[in-house]
Amino acid sequence: MNARTLLIALTFTLLTLLIWQLRWVLLILFGAVVLAVTLDVPVKKLMERFGLKRQVALLLVLIALFLGGMLVVQLLLPELLGQFEQLTALLPNLINKIRSIISSQPSLQNLDISPSESLSWQGIQPVGAQLLGYAGGAANALVQVLLMSLLAILLALDPNSHRQMLIAFSPRPARAQVTELLDRCRDALGGWLAGMTISATAVFVLTWTGLAILGVPLALLSGLLCGLLTFVPTIGPTAATLLPMGIALLISPTLMIQVLVLRLALQNIEAFLVTPVLLSRTVNLLPTVALTAQLSLGALLGLPGVLLALPLVVVLQVVMQQVVIKKVMDPW
């Protein structure tokens, strides 16, 4: 091994360690880029249609988002709070229902789900410490979200300057290719975000309507959860199904099966019809790639890694196609 190879290996190792130490900063920065692209889609539409300046168009988009959010909160928040109170009241009944099902099965009678030990003072103390830890984690997450939002607004105010800065750091012969790569990444990420937003909205409305027709309590809360978790494909829809199924189980096993059939039908329609059609012109991810990315980033970075796994894979897929395949593998 010559000195040049050793220097390259040492530089690569130091760069990897630096990236790992700054992983949370890079994660917030990438989340800000995702939010900035989300804002940039309607901003560009306003600029092209009405000839507005970017600052004015961005301000109008932010005002529209704020007013729309306030309207949604006024319309849905009272209902959601009432349904959340119902959920807290139904949880003990759900636990008792599951306990009765377990006790009726001979193979499951050895399971002990009695809460007596956890209700003692020795059991409450570690729970209190965990709650304090969760509160600190929630405050930290709120600060990160605020920083991410601020960075997103700053990026959306002047994306061309940040884009030119990235291009300037690339070698002169490769700048045209870097420009094309950035454009393709932006188009793929914007198309994926738009498609997933439409898909999540459709899942929310259809799930809410279907559960309401079946007479399942907390239909709005369950539909909202299913819609939000659509942004976490494979894992999210499966986890979201547990809430309406558990609530339906309190009424009857037949209703639980009906809810399961409804959710399976909606998941298959969303996964094999709605999402492929919406993403056919931008990028479509294989389920194996999506699940592997979610598991990997979830193990490394926790919940934020799971939430940002899919946008990151969308960008990496474009980079692989434009750089690794076209520039390296095809000539080779």
Image: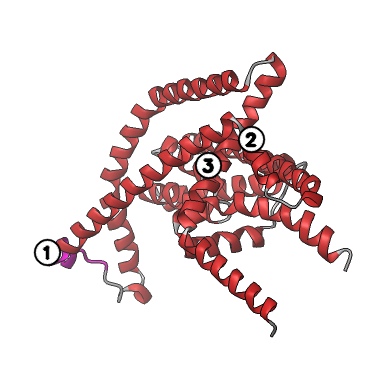
- Let me know if residue 17 is in the magenta part: no
- Left/right of residue 58 with respect to residue 90 in the rendered view: right
Residue in front for this viewpoint, 153 or 265: 153
Instruction: Say which amino acid is labelled 3.
Output: Ala
Residue range corresponding to the magenta coloring: 113-124
Q: Give the answer, above or below, for where 208 lies relative to 76.
A: below
Residue wearing tag 1 = 120
Q: Distance between the residues labelled 2 and 1?
A: 60 Å
Furthest-left residue in this view: 121
Residue in front for this viewpoint, 171 or 239: 171
Residue wearing tag 2 = 161
SS for tag 2?
helix
Mark 1 and mark 2 in contact (Cβ < 8 Å)?
A: no
Mark 3 and mark 1 in contact (Cβ < 8 Å)?
A: no
Residue in front for this viewpoint, 177 or 330: 177
N-term-proximal mark, 2 vs 1: 1
Closer to the eye: label 2 or 3: 2
Q: Give the answer, above or below, for where 90 lies relative to 125.
A: above
The reply to whether residue 35 is visible in this rendering is yes
Residue 178: x %, y % from top left: 75, 48
